[in-house]
Amino acid sequence: MSGYALPIRNLIREFAKFPGIGEKTATRLANHVLHASVDEVRVFAESLLDVKRKIHLCSVCFNLAEGELCEICADRGRDHGTICVVEDADSLIALEASGGYNGVYHVLQGAISPLDGIGPEQLRIAELIARLDNQEVNEVIIATNPDTSGEATALFLLKLLKGRGVKVSRIACGVPMGGDLRYIDKMTLAKSLEFRRSA
Amino acid sequence: MSGYALPIRNLIREFAKFPGIGEKTATRLANHVLHASVDEVRVFAESLLDVKRKIHLCSVCFNLAEGELCEICADRGRDHGTICVVEDADSLIALEASGGYNGVYHVLQGAISPLDGIGPEQLRIAELIARLDNQEVNEVIIATNPDTSGEATALFLLKLLKGRGVKVSRIACGVPMGGDLRYIDKMTLAKSLEFRRSA
């Protein structure tokens, strides 16, 4: 970075703090800022601050939201009787991108992980139960990640929701579409055999 | 991007304007902003605006500078009798990073390219001549890029500086260090033969 004036060096250092951005890419991005117009940079800086100022959690499902409700909870066209439980907003976005779901969500804000000090009371599980008590819900789909903490959370929720008269399901686990069996790990293959469907 | 609240979508769009940043990377970067503290984001936004507010061109060499003079022109430890002429600040940074130069620079702010409407009068050539008139200069090293417009600029400068009693040189052209002759273009190989040095 030697040869650059201090404000440019500062900006390069700031860009390099982002995940997956090394010094070379950071320099390229800072160069783009140098050559952009003042107005363009102002709009960018404003949009950064906007995210921190305006985004908070939806009061119903704890998805990231601009208003009181997130866009999904506010959408009357969606099936509010089906709740998909996810760990975080990123999972929600991934499921939304799949286009295969028209229900609503509940974002737990993490998964049970005793080693990290995260128990059920650190998650939005009480709020999920409250939703089931206060509104008509037909089905809860548990879509936590298929890893240790996600599975632990799913198991906990399954026990908690049993006998509440609501259908509870777990997203399917198996070989990914387009995958090659040679390169898929043993656990996934075992699951894909265990959960085989009659054709 | 569906599922994200508007301020996040805006930020993703802003990140995606950077060169080499696609929607996926932009989303990852926006996510980092979401999870960063307000203060961290404020520092980042501030450093962006700082670059536009504080950076201008050095009054001597037209390098990017924070003060009246750039750090190189202000450095009394450097050899002010040797001027390396480059097209832009990026070239200057690359040469500085090589660590092989202790003189000063002159940044032309481009190269002669008639098709783009850039002639000698659009570049900082008059200012270079003024520097030669007003101070003791022993050598001018022409380090424009070895492409059409860079070579045209070098040729123009060579003619202009001839007979001024100053030593003029051009950076060496040849095979890059660590290169493999099999994969080096014909033009470069021809140059490396033409400019061979007696060993």
Image (cartoon, coloured by chain):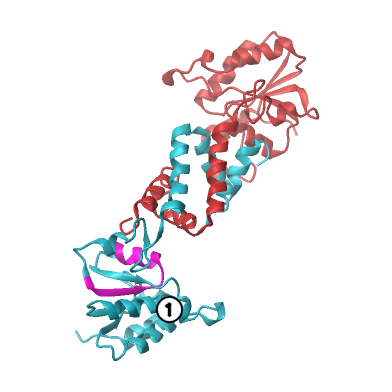
Chain colours: A red, B cyan
Position of B16 with respect to B170 (left or right) is right
Q: Position of residue B26 (x, y in %)?
A: 55, 46
Nearer-the-camera pick, A125 or A190: A125
User: Residue B131 location, x and y as percent?
Assistant: 31, 76
Q: Picture quarter containing residue B103? A: bottom left
Q: Position of residue B121 (x, y in %)?
A: 46, 80
Q: Mark 1 belongs to which subunit?
A: B
Q: For residue B183, which quarter of the picture? A: bottom left
Image vertical order of residue A67 relative to residue B44, above or below: above
Q: Is residue A69 magenta?
A: no
Position of the C terminus of chain B, as image quadrant, is bottom left
Q: Nearer the viewer, residue B21 or B174?
A: B21
Q: Magenta segment: does it hold B88?
A: yes
Left or right position of A60 against B199: right
Please state the total of marks drawn on the protein image.
Answer: 1
Q: Residues within 10 Å of mark 1 (few under 14, many from 20)?
A: many
In the picture of the structure, the residue carrying the numbered disc 1 is: B150
Q: Which amino acid does the dot numbered 1 rest on?
A: Gly
Q: Measured along the vertical axis of the image, is residue B163 above or below residue B130?
A: below
The answer to which quarter of the image holds residue A124 is top right
Residue A19 visible in the picture: no
Q: Which residues are magenta?
A: B80-97
- Judge by depth and name the residue closer to the eye, B19 or B111: B111
Q: Secondary structure at mark 1?
A: helix
Q: Residue at x 44, y 33 (%)?
A: B39
Q: Residue furthest front?
A: B134
Taking A44 as reference, is A98 left or right?
right
Where is residue B173? Give x, y as percent. 34, 79
Quarter of the N terminus of chain B within the rendering: top right
Q: Which residue is farthest right?
A: A77
Visible in this render: residue B26? yes
Residue pictured at 43% horizontal, 48% vertical: B50
